[in-house]
Amino acid sequence: MDEQGMRYHSRMWVRPENLNANGTLFGGHLLSWIDEQVALYSIVQLGNERVVTKYMSEINFVSSAWQGDIIELGIFPVKFGRTSLTLRCNVRNMVTRESIITVDKIVMVSLDDQGRPLEHGYSEITYARDRIPHRMKPIPRPEPHIPEAVSSHEPLADLDG
Ligand SMILES: CC(C)(COP(=O)(O)OP(=O)(O)OC[C@H]1O[C@@H](n2cnc3c(N)ncnc32)[C@H](O)[C@@H]1OP(=O)(O)O)[C@@H](O)C(=O)NCCC(=O)NCCS
């Protein structure tokens, strides 16, 4: 645990496919990794597989990472809400401990089987595997609303014709 109360749950090698055109870690890849790790953490804490990202605060990359670096991700639960869990996340170089990014506020929301916010009933972090959820079906996709003007269009002309 570091001075911000964070536990570093996962580590990643920076591979060639993670790089931007500058030859350093691509920010989009890092955000995807953060989002996935925070979602997995929230699933275990809220006992529900249906957890989605609602809000992320400022994204400010303060340093970079290079191919071959090992980076690690820390998560700290800031607040258990009624249907949400707010977390802070830091990614740093594992060796130098230099911070790459801190996202101060990430809000994850627990959903019911219709995709509505669901009260989770928890107020404290668990360190045991006592909230592992059962496997569930994906949330059904709502019927899309297709405006009349679009749905009555003739099929697009064959571009070769
Ligand atoms: C998540 C979603 C169901 C929430 O719907 P909503 O109408 O905002 O629901 P509520 O107003 O009841 O808010 C639910 C929780 O989110 C919190 N919340 C909502 N908007 C927020 C915001 N802008 N910032 C921080 N927290 C927020 C609320 O405080 C509430 O938390 P609490 O119950 O612990 O107090 C809806 O916005 C949604 O489906 N969004 C898409 C999520 C998604 O698919 N994410 C993946 C990327 S596309």
Image (cartoon, rainbow, N blue to C red):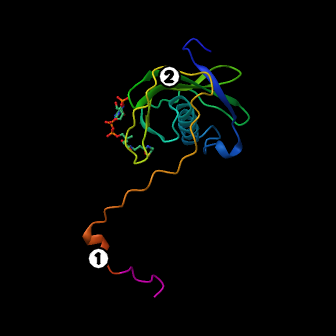
Query: Does residue 75 appear in this view?
Result: yes
Tell me if residue 157 is in the magenta stretch.
yes
* Horizontal side of residue 158 vs 143, given as left or right: right
**Which quadrant does the N terminus fall into?**
top right
Q: Secondary structure at mark 1?
A: loop
For the residue marked with disc 1, what is the amino acid? Answer: Ser
Tell me if residue 33 is in the magenta stretch.
no
Magenta-drawn segment: 155-161
**Residue 145 rendering spot, x and y as whole percentages:** 31, 62
**Which quadrant does the C terminus fall into?**
bottom left
The residue shown at (51%, 37%) is 48
Q: Is residue 80 above or below residue 5?
A: below
Q: Quadrant of ligand 1?
A: top left
The residue shown at (52%, 32%) is 42
Q: Is residue 86 above or below residue 29?
A: above
Q: Quadrant of residue 56?
A: top left
**Residue 139 rendering spot, x and y as whole percentages:** 46, 51
For the residue marked with disc 2, what is the amino acid? Answer: Pro
Q: Secondary structure at mark 2?
A: strand
